[in-house]
Structures are given as structure tokens and as C-alpha cells.
Amino acid sequence: MDSQSKTDIQDILQRLREKGEEKEEMSVRDMIETTGSRSFGPLLLLAGLIAISPLSGIPGVPSTVALIVIVSAGQMLVGRDHFWLPDWILRKKIAGNKIRKGMEMLMRPAGFVDRFMRPRMRVLTRGVGAGFVAVFCILVAATMPPLEPLPFLASTAGIVLTLMGMSLTTQDGLVALIGIIAAPLIGFGVYSLLS
């Protein structure tokens, strides 16, 4: 489904950071074009990165990210090779300086992660496995809008979405497995925090 070869996550962040410096505002379309791909892995990775960055504290951002994930993962599930997003989502904008700051915060951890990513356990990133990842992403994204009123709590879902996006982008099924295992643990932590 997403056959993109190994991608340097730090490189994606750097491109977004530079574009955030150039533009006063960045639309979702600008961000997608900056990542240079119309495939699902980089889009899910981008959505996850936005959700775990300080950008998730901006009202409406977690719900927009959730909608992008649900729409794109739904298309992945039905076998499309490339995603389509409605124009009104692509026009949504975030201040360029916020994009720059958010991506800068993620650069160091991304460099650490990049050293370990490689194609393996591809059964989880292709065919039926990729379909399972798509369903999993939809379920995780559906938790984000209810968590949005609580500052930065939707970022917990962003961690899982980032792992799923990384796994599809780099064809690393081990990362998908880590995300699948981590999700209920993160969910239990959030539930404990709220109860």
C-alpha cells in the first residue's frame, strides 16, 4: 500500500522547519507538499508529529489531525495508492513560526530514532498488515477530539500515530508492533489520569 522507501524523519522535520521560517502561515497543503509525497506513511507521520508537538495545544489542531488521519487511513483501507483530502482541510493554516518551533523540538529525538529504523517485519506494513494498521490508526484518531479540551492530552494519540507513520514510511513492521503494544498502555495511563 505504501511502498515508499526508507525516509529520514529528521529530513522531513528540517524541510517543515525551513518552510515555517519562510512563510507567515502554512496550510495543510503546504505541509504535505513540503514532505514531498502523496503516500500514506509520510502523511500519517506528519499528522503524528503535529499531534505530539506543541502545535497540539492550538484549539482545533487535534480534531483536524484526527480528521486527516481518519479520511486518509480510510482510503488506505480500501486500497488506494495515494490519498485525497478535501480542499477545506488542505486550506487550514497554522502560523509558520509555530511550525518552526514545533519541528525544532522534535529534531533531536528524530535523529535518535532515524538510527534504528530499517525495513523489517514487512508483513505489518503491506497488504493485510497495512490494512490492520489503517484500522488501528482510525481507532486511535477517533480518541483525539474528545481529549482536545484537556491541554496536550491528544498528544498521547499522536505518539501512536507517529509510530504508525514511521513504520509505513520506512517499512519497519517492528515499529508498528511497538505502536500496537504501546497504545493500550498509553490509553490506560490517560484513563488513570482522568479518573
Image (tube, rainbow, N blue to C red):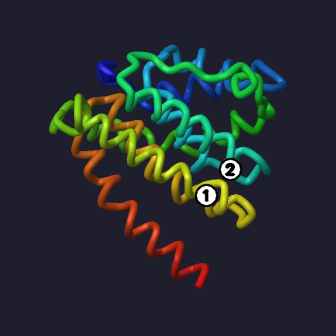
Residue under the image location 44 percent in, 74 percent down: 188
Q: Name the amino acid, label 1.
A: Ala
Residue 184 at x, y percent in the picture: 38, 66
Q: CA distance from mark 2 to mark 1?
A: 7 Å
The numbered mark at residue 56 is 2
The quadrant of the picture occupied by the C terminus is bottom right
For label 1, the crowd category at 10 Å Cα-Cα, with few meaning under 14, some 14 to 19 and many 20 or more, is many
On screen, residue 81 above or below 105: above
Q: List the residue tagged with mark 1.
A: 154
The quadrant of the picture occupied by the N terminus is top left
| C-beta proximity under 8 Å, tags 2 and 1 | yes
Q: What secondary structure is found at the residue carrying circle 2? A: helix
Answer whether residue 21 is visible to the viewer in this image: no
Q: What secondary structure is found at the residue carrying circle 1? A: loop
Residue 32 at x, y percent in the picture: 59, 21
Front-most of residues 84 and 164: 84
Looking at the image, tell me whether mark 2 or mark 1 is earlier in sequence order.
2
Residue under the image location 68 percent in, 40 percent down: 64
For label 2, the crowd category at 10 Å Cα-Cα, with few meaning under 14, some 14 to 19 and many 20 or more, is many
Residue under the image location 52 percent in, 55 percent down: 157
Q: Is residue 16 left or right of residue 116?
A: right
Q: Kindly indicate the quadrant of the structure image that contains residue 34.
A: top right
Residue 133 at x, y percent in the picture: 34, 42
Q: Name the amino acid, label 2.
A: Ser
Front-most of residues 71 and 160: 71
On screen, residue 147 above or below 79: below
Q: Is residue 75 left or right of residue 104?
A: left
The numbered mark at residue 13 is none
Residue 183 at x, y percent in the picture: 39, 60
